[in-house]
Every structure is written in structure tokens, then in C-alpha cells.
Image (cartoon, grey):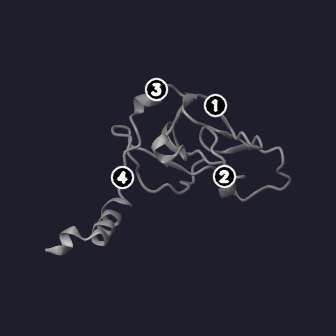
């Protein structure tokens, strides 16, 4: 009976049941127009809900250069610009320009992590890893 109240078992159940499953991101009405974004404050602004021309995505809001949070709140922007060193990404996560970048970086280092989300519930589909889209 005591294992019903054991904190270690509860923590393990939480990890096993919920860590890899879908999670609520938001509603598609949070980003109604193309180029709209909303930072996810319950994730410490580490992710954005973004609507691009090809759908709604969860996009990393952390610059690949110095790991700065780039946007907070909500708005409309075709480009995402890091406030530290002006690295610039499009709203699909592709690096467009970097003032201090002298050598090309590998393809995965030039993109922000992006995940597709379902249209109905805007829940996470798959992992947060780079999805290979351009």
C-alpha cells in the first residue's frame, strides 16, 4: 500500500507516462495570420507557436549562436532577429544572415528546431528535434 504514496514511484510514473507524449502547445487562434507568433511563457519563452505560409509550427526561440531568447509575447514578423548579435532567421527557422559568421555551418546548425503540430488541438506531434524541413 505504501507505494501508492511513494514520491519516487510517482516521479517515475510521470516520466514514463507523460514525457514522450503529446503536450498542449496552444490554440491555432493564438496565431491567426501568416507570420504571427506567440512565445510560450509556460516554457520560459524557449519555444514559439508560429504560423507560416505552410501551417502552424512549434519553433525554438533560442538563437543557435549564443542561446539567447529572441522573442517574447506575440506579434507578426517575417524575420526573427536575435537581440544579441543580430543573427536573423525566417519564420520557418532557417538562418538567413549572421553578421559575424565567416564560415558556413553544417545544415542542422543553420536551423532552429521546428516541430509540426496538429491543426485541431495544436498539440505536439513527434519530438522537438529538428524535423529536416527547409
Q: Which residue is mark 3?
A: 32
Identify the secondary structure beneath mark 3. Answer: loop
Where residue 31 appears, as percent x and y from the top left, is 47, 30
> Are discs 2 and 1 less than 8 Å apart at CB?
no
Identify the secondary structure beneath mark 4. Answer: loop
Check residue 22 in the rendering and tell me which mark sits there, or answer none.
Answer: 4
- Residue located 55% across and 47% down the image: 46
> Are discs 4 and 3 less than 8 Å apart at CB?
no
How busy is the neighbourhood of tag 2: few (under 14 within 10 Å), some, or many (20 plus)? Answer: few
Where residue 37 appears, as percent x and y from the top left, is 54, 33
Where residue 106 appears, as percent x and y from the top left, is 72, 59
Q: CA distance from mark 1 to mark 3?
A: 14 Å
Q: Which residue is mark 2?
A: 67
Choose top left, top right, bottom left or bottom right for residue 20: bottom left
Q: CA distance from mark 2 to mark 4?
A: 25 Å
Identify the mark nearer the N-term, 2 or 3.
3
Residue closer to the observer: 26 or 130: 26
- Residue located 57% across and 51% down the image: 113
Marks 2, 3: nearer the viewer: 2
Residue extending furthest toward the right: 102
How busy is the neighbourhood of tag 1: few (under 14 within 10 Å), some, or many (20 plus)? Answer: some
**Number of on-image labels:** 4
Q: CA distance from mark 1 to mark 4?
A: 28 Å
Identify the secondary structure beneath mark 1. Answer: loop
Check residue 78 in the rendering and tell me which mark sits there, or answer none.
Answer: 1
Q: CA distance from mark 2 to mark 1?
A: 21 Å
How busy is the neighbourhood of tag 4: few (under 14 within 10 Å), some, or many (20 plus)? Answer: some
Where residue 23 appears, as percent x and y from the top left, is 37, 50
> Are discs 1 and 3 less than 8 Å apart at CB?
no
Residue closer to the observer: 3 or 107: 3
Identify the mark nearer the N-term, 2 or 4.
4
Q: Is residue 12 above or below residue 80?
A: below
Amino acid at each position: 500500500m505504501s507505494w501508492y504514496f511513494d514520491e519516487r514511484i510517482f516521479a517515475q510514473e510521470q516520466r514514463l507516462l507523460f514525457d514522450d507524449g503529446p503536450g498542449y502547445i496552444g490554440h491555432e487562434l493564438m496565431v491567426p495570420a501568416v507570420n504571427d507568433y506567440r512565445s510560450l511563457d509556460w516554457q520560459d519563452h524557449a519555444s514559439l507557436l508560429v504560423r507560416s505560409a505552410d501551417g502552424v509550427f512549434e519553433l525554438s526561440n533560442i538563437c543557435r549562436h549564443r542561446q539567447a531568447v529572441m522573442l517574447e509575447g506575440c506579434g507578426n514578423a517575417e524575420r526573427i532577429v536575435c537581440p544579441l548579435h543580430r543573427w536573423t532567421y525566417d519564420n520557418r527557422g532557417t538562418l538567413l544572415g549572421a553578421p559575424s559568421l565567416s564560415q558556413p555551418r553544417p545544415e542542422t546548425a543553420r536551423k532552429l528546431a521546428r516541430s509540426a503540430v496538429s491543426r485541431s488541438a495544436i498539440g505536439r506531434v513527434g519530438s522537438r528535434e529538428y524535423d529536416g524541413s527547409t
